[in-house]
Amino acid sequence: MAVLNDPNTAANIVAVGEKSAGSTGAAAVSIRPIPTSIGAYRFGIWLTMATSQAANSRLFELRNSSSNLIIPTRVRGTAFTSGTVTTGYTFEMGLYRLTGFTALDTTNTVTPTSSVLRTSFTAFPGSGAQVRHVTVAGAAAGMTGGTMTKDAQLISSFRYLTGTAAPTAPFYANDHMHDFLDPSPGFTQPLVLAQNEGIEIENITAGSATSNVVSVYLEVGWYEVAAF
């Protein structure tokens, strides 16, 4: 049993997360945010997959361009059929770590804007982060033109079996939500991105040949810190 006490008062002892060792109740301990003087950031975006979206086409990327460190704290995605799909298929998104990431994609890209999580932080997306996502209306080839090396194995993937039409009954996107990273980085070793490293989310499986109306929601958050 873990206990805390005031060294100046011998009887002042409290248990942590268990029954009390003294006269006080158990203490609840919470994980505090990662200390940072630079910033914490988060944004979400809806995308429409293009007709016959290419396999391994990039939908999102985050690059660290500075000597600071970037720690992704949330990478979450969902997908659902939002229109006609001629033939249902298994849709899959994957998260990959990138190295040698010296240039962002330049074709079919959008630069998002968002708010910081605290007014005093460096403005979005921070001093080192560079963020792009694919054209909202869809681009079959995904984002292209960048310079990067993708790890041989993905970190995490999300699969969704598309229907042949948009749902007509009540649909809850959270039922198909996937956390690509552990949702509580305070309890595990987080992914830490150094300069010219980053992450990408890509469409892994080629889309239906004639029609592919699938909507994707991505929610991404990260800290930028001088040291970790």
Image (cartoon, helix red, strand yellow):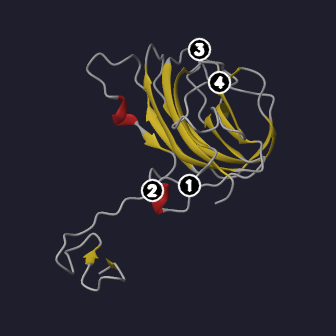
Give the residue at mark 2: 32
- In the rendered structure, the answer to whether residue 80 lies left or right of residue 222 reads left
Question: Which of pointers 2 and 3 lies earlier in the amino acid sequence?
Answer: 2
Question: Which of pointers 4 and 1 lies earlier in the amino acid sequence?
Answer: 1
- Of badges 2 and 3, the one in the foreground is 2
User: Which of 228 and 11 lies nearest the eye of the viewer?
Assistant: 11
Question: Which of pointers 1 and 3 lies earlier in the amino acid sequence?
Answer: 1
In contact (CB < 8 Å): disc 2 and disc 1: yes
- Of badges 4 and 1, the one in the foreground is 1
Residue 6 horizontal/vertical position (percent): 34, 78
- Of badges 1 and 3, the one in the foreground is 1
Estimate the spatial distance between the alpha carbons at disc 4 and disc 2, rounded to whole Å: 33 Å
Give the residue at mark 1: 35
- Of badges 4 and 2, the one in the foreground is 2
User: Which of 145 and 207 lies nearest the eye of the viewer?
Assistant: 145
Rendered residue at 39%/35% (across/down): 176
